[in-house]
Image (tube, rainbow, N blue to C red):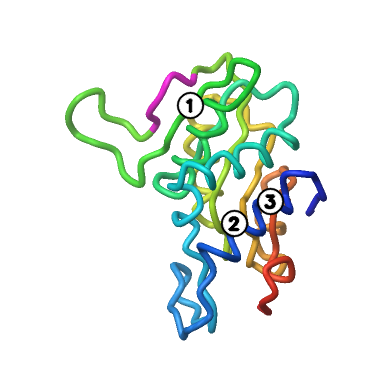
Amino acid sequence: MVFSTPSRSSLIDHLRTYALRTDGPFTLASGAVSSWYLDGRQTTFDGDGARRVAAAVLELLDSQVTAVGGMTMGADPIAIATAACSDRPLKAFSIRKAAKDHGTGGRLVGPVTTDDRVCVVEDTMTTGGSTVAAIEVLRAERIDVVQVITMVDRSGGAAEAAMSAIGLDLVALVTPDDLGVAL
């Protein structure tokens, strides 16, 4: 599901200018090969870009959400920017790809607790597999996931189906059409 918001067009402009590459071929994390690539970190790691992503997320963030995060590394800058730019108290968290065997261990990092209601965020979805894995970690910790937002959904419906299969809706801020590229 894609929504139109005032901040969305500003985000699209930043992504087109700084993050979109059309000089492929590129091999994606899913193993698929594409003629275009979106390096979301060119936007999410940039101060101006991070504020644009946060503004777009905040316009769509469910009012009951108290924490934002997801699988490291794609979700980290989005979660931190969203929490920092919010006018209401929000926590950011991260989920490691594997548990650490030192320190406090585990995969969940940050001040999120079982009292929180969370939004899982991601920079770019091709299949939704990493996001499903993040949600499984949260649910195993008895943390209530109420929303899923991706900056860019390039899955052609696969990510939305993956979220639907686990009882959640996917909100996409941007699609390939918005960027002027085809799946």
The answer to whether the residue labelled 3 contacts the one labelled 1, judged by CB atoms less than 8 Å apart, is no
Q: Which residue is mark 1?
A: 141
Q: Position of residue 110 (x, y in %)?
A: 40, 24
Q: Position of residue 100 (x, y in %)?
A: 24, 36
Label 3 CA crowd tier, 10 Å (few <14, some 14–19, many 20+): some
**Under tag 1, what secondary structure?**
loop
- Magenta residue span: 108-112
For marks 1 and 2 on the same chain, the one whose residue lies earlier in the sequence: 2
The circle on residue 10 is 3
The answer to whether the residue labelled 1 contacts the one labelled 2, judged by CB atoms less than 8 Å apart, is no
Q: Which residue is mark 2?
A: 14
Q: Residue at x 61, y 52 (%)?
A: 151
For residue 6, which quarter of the picture?
A: top right
Name the kind of residue labelled 3 in the image.
Ser
The answer to whether the residue labelled 2 contacts the one labelled 3, judged by CB atoms less than 8 Å apart, is yes
Disc 2 to disc 3, how far (Cα)?
Answer: 6 Å
